[in-house]
Structure formats: C-alpha cells, structure tokens
Amino acid sequence: MEENYNSKIHRSIVLYGAKILREQAQEVDLSGEGVLSPQIKNIIDSLFHLSNAAEGIGLAAPQIGESLRIFIVSAALLPEGEGMAKDFRRVCINPQLIWQSKELSTYEEGCLSIPGIRAPITRPKQVELSYVDEHGKSIKETFDDLPARVVQHEYDHLEGKLFIDYLSPLKRRLLKKKLNQIRDGIEPQKPETQN
Ligand SMILES: [Zn+2]
C-alpha cells in the first residue's frame, strides 16, 4: 500500500460550496513516535505544490479534500517586500491557538477556495500557536503581521470557517452572486496572490 502514497495522488483545490470546507477537521494521529506517515507527508507535499501552483501563500488540508488538521504557509511566490521573508515556510500539524493580541490589524484577504473575491478583514495582529512541524517536533511560536494573518486564516479552515464569515451581512449579500457562481462552478476567475 505504501507505494500508493508515494505515487502522485491527484488532488486539486476544493472550491467554495464544498461541504468539507465547513467541517471541523480531524486531529492527525501522531502516536507513531514523532514520525509522520507517508500519507501525511504526501498531503504536505500536495499542499506546497498546489499553493505554489496557484501562487498562494498558504493552504489547509480541507482545501485539498483532506479533513485533517494540517496547514502550510509558503512565501516562496510572494513578491519581495510584501510582508513575509521569501524563505518563510511552515508546516503546522494539529495547531492550537494559545494567544491572540488585543491589538488588531486590517488587511485585504483572499482565499484559493474562493477565487476572485478579496476583502479587508480585521484580525489580531499577533498570535501564538503551538503545533507539530513536518519533522514531528512540537513547536510554540509567536507570529506577527502577515504571517500571523495567514496562520489565522489557515487555522480557520481547520474549524470550517472562511474569511467571508467575518464580513457584514450587507457585504456578504453584495457578494452572494459571485459566491453562488463559484459554488456552481461558473467561470471562477484566476486568483491573484491568495491564501
Ligand atoms: Zn483560505
């Protein structure tokens, strides 16, 4: 069976309207003494591959059809000086938000699962997260500014939450037609840098 995990499993980014994007993702079983299974490694590879291919800066497992508590952040394709170092790269498994700053910041967000829609979203400026990395190591890390924003956006995906949930009812009503088009698979526009 292991060969199956090593061979390329066809995955693609799941779009708005898919049920999995609204589900609470499952904890990853890490009982194997810190060693990640080939299946989990394969999912991590797919997350980086698909995020980069779509010029995103982060992607969560539910967005590729896997209801597991894993997300990645990758600034590899972010233009220089856009708020994250080019080599900023994280794999967060079973993350837990342990602290959020009172200070807030507002920044325009997008989502690879909701192509063509962007909106300013207000979130805590800093967060502290505990997670297990791709080597099975437990980490506690504080994120600031853009990395903090991406981490919160991706964490939300594991809770079945989308950035549009933060918009006012009026704003959501204005976006309803576009959202329905994405849901119904009608010509999703090519996303710009999104997460
Ligand atoms: Zn997203």
Image: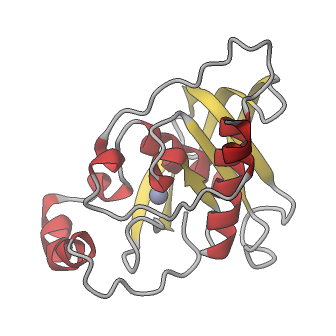
The residue located at (32%, 38%) in the rendering is 23
The residue located at (41%, 59%) in the rendering is 121
Judged left or right of residue 93, residue 187 is left
Judged left or right of residue 179, residue 13 is right
Q: Position of residue 48 (x, y in %)?
A: 70, 58
Q: Does the rendering let one see residue 82?
A: yes
The residue located at (41%, 64%) in the rendering is 113
Q: Position of residue 15 (x, y in %)?
A: 36, 65
Q: Position of residue 95 (x, y in %)?
A: 60, 29
Q: Position of residue 115 (x, y in %)?
A: 41, 75
Judge by depth and name the residue closer to the eye, 161 or 148.
161
Q: Quadrant location of the N terminus?
A: top right
Judged left or right of residue 100, residue 186 is left
Q: Is residue 14 above or below residue 155?
A: below
Judge by depth and name the residue closer to the eye, 136 or 157.
136
The residue located at (69%, 64%) in the rendering is 49
Q: Is residue 139 above or below residue 125?
A: above
Q: Does the rendering let one see residue 144?
A: no
